[in-house]
Amino acid sequence: EVISMESDDIMKCPPLLSSKITMDAVAARNTSLAPKDTRSDDRKISAKETDQLSVGDAVYAAWWNSKKRDQSYTMFRGTVKATKSDQLSLSYDVEFDDGKFLAGIDKSLVIS
């Protein structure tokens, strides 16, 4: 069945509400292998003026449930422990708030 609407009808439609999902909501869907969120709220995560993060920065970083990192990932809170860069790439070593560690996470998958 095709429904036809005239332009006046479209103007009467209520606006669509966007669905917001927080990083904590994403973290709540973790598995037993994924890091657990154990950090208190004493560290603030804020946008930086530069693209490069520093050791000690509070971040959200990708976590994979497979060593191959070829499946989907979930973002969890952690702390930058090291930065690695060359002419072509930048990556971070991150210790997650539950103590788990992941090295060489591409800069596009680590946000402050």
Image (spheres, helix red, strand yellow):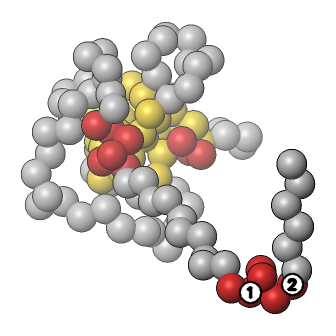
Is disc 2 placed on a helix, strand or loop?
A: helix
Q: Amino acid at mark 1?
A: Met
Residue designated by label 1 = 11
In this picture, residue 12 sits left or right of residue 8: left
Q: Quadrant of the C terminus?
A: bottom left
Q: Give how far across and how far down residue 14 sits, in percent.
A: 60, 78
Is disc 1 placed on a helix, strand or loop?
A: helix
> Mark 1 to mark 2: distance in Å?
7 Å
In the image, is residue 69 above or below residue 10?
above
Q: Residue at x 89, y 54 (%)?
A: 2
Q: Residue at x 73, y 40 (%)?
A: 88
Q: Is residue 89 visible?
A: yes
Check whether the beta carbons of the residues at disc 1 and disc 2 lie within 8 A of each other: yes
Mark carried by residue 7: 2
In this picture, residue 69 sits left or right of residue 100: right
Q: Nearer the viewer, residue 13 or 48?
A: 13
Q: Quadrant of residue 102?
A: top left
Q: How many marks?
A: 2
In the image, is residue 39 above or below residue 44?
above
